[in-house]
Amino acid sequence: MMDPALELLCSALSEYPGQSLLVADEQLDSTLLLSLKTMENLSLLTNRYDVYQTALENNIRCTFNDMNIGELEQAFDLIAYRVSKEKAIVHHIINQAPRHLTAKGNLLICGYKNEGIKTYITKAEHYFGCKADVSKGERQLKLAEFSLHKLGDPLDDRNYDETVCIGEQRNLELFSKPGQFGWNKIDKGSELLIDAFAEHVQQTQPPGTVMDLGCGYGYLSVMAWALGSKQIVATDNNAAAVDSCQTNFDRHGINGEVIADDCAAGIHHQYDVVLCNPPFHKGFDTETDLTEKFIRSARHHLKNDGVAFVVVNQFIPVEAVAPAYFKCVEIVYRDKSFKVFKLSS
Ligand SMILES: C[S@@+](CC[C@H](N)C(=O)[O-])C[C@H]1O[C@@H](n2cnc3c(N)ncnc32)[C@H](O)[C@@H]1O
């Protein structure tokens, strides 16, 4: 789905001479991405693996990491950024900008009022020591340009780069960091999924191989390991998730691998069990197609006699989608917020 904020930003970007950097997350869809092909002096930094893959396929210079501009080892005349959903990422990117701009370089940020753009502009004005040049678009959209005058105090990015212990379950500590889904809490739905999986393990035995599809910081992997799973492959599209999940694998000596990928499209193995708490948001929009993409991938990565456990919010229609891929679609737990499905062939 086209994002008018990002479109406005890209159209402003195309008018700048010099070396420019577009910092983009999941808001950047492939149509807009392809329109950037003609900008020779453009580099792209993204924390989304699908965006990275599409950029490379189209010969657009692109780096995939957890929003670390320093890794590009270059100064830019312009850094352009459409604000993300999570405040810590926005602050982290604004904080880095002055270090990676040329002497006369500018930062350009864009977003809507309900995304907090007014506050971001005020904070960035203090940090850059300048008054922003602001232009307005439809539906209270704002595009603001900053040039560095006198560097002030950085914005609070919640120690963006630090991985911290956020709690403990089944005697194992959980490590996470900002920049990803519910980074500092244990998701209720994921906990319910693990309860259902634990019951399954009790009735059968711990599985040999598990895939954690859309792993986030790796809560499901750590719990599957605590429950005796022998080998786990965890995968996510988001660089922050992959980094913190890897920390959990290292800390607990989990036998397996953490792989950056778009819904495991590049992983061609089948597993005894697939665990998945799929996303239902992409950026600021809800995408129902995402559910089907994850259910299809769960089937594709499951052995014929394997079992998938999937948790979703009540309003996500897994029962309508799953029968196209699984013979047996069973709701093993439901309350007023969540449904946990056990899917098998
Ligand atoms: C609801 S969260 C669940 C995270 C984790 N499994 C848990 O239980 O705490 C969904 C996860 O899916 C990831 N995700 C979103 N789109 C993806 C894609 N195309 N491919 C792989 N993972 C994706 C998100 O980054 C996020 O970590």
Image: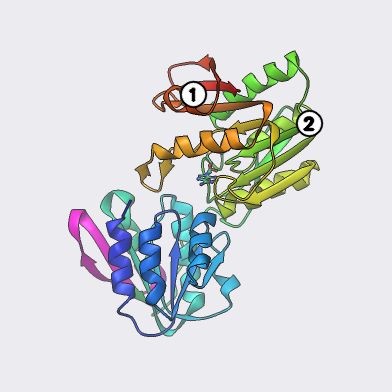
Quarter of the picture for ligand 1? top right
- Looking at the image, which is closer to me, 152 or 169? 169
Task: Provide residue 28's location: percent of width, then percent of height.
Answer: 40, 58
Q: Where is residue 335 in the image (x, y as percent from the top left)?
A: 47, 16
Front of the two marks 1 and 2? 1
**Disc 2, SS:** loop
Query: Total label count?
Result: 2
At 40% from the left and 64% from the top, the residue drawn is 33
Q: At 40% from the left edge and 85% from the top edge, which residue is drawn?
A: 18
Q: Quadrant of residue 146?
A: bottom left
Please identify the quadrant where the C terminus is shown: top right
Left/right placement of residue 304 relative to residue 80 reads right
Amino acid type, label 1: Pro
Looking at the rendered structure, the kind of residue marked 2 is Gly
Taking 322 as reference, is 20 above or below it?
below
Residue at which label 2 appears: 208
Can you identify the residue that label 1 sits on? 323
Q: Is residue 44 left or right of residue 250?
A: left
Residue 77 picture quarter: bottom left
Q: Give the range drawn in magenta.
A: 127-145
Foreground of the two, 247 or 257:
257
Q: Is residue 160 left or right of residue 138?
A: right
Query: Circle 1: is it few (<14), some (14-19), or many (20+) Cα within 10 Å?
Result: some
What is the CA distance from the residue labelled 1 to the residue labelled 2? 26 Å
User: Do labels 1 and 2 touch, CB within 8 Å?
Assistant: no
Earlier residue among tags 1 and 2: 2
Q: Is residue 6 above or below residue 307?
A: below
Badge 1 element: helix
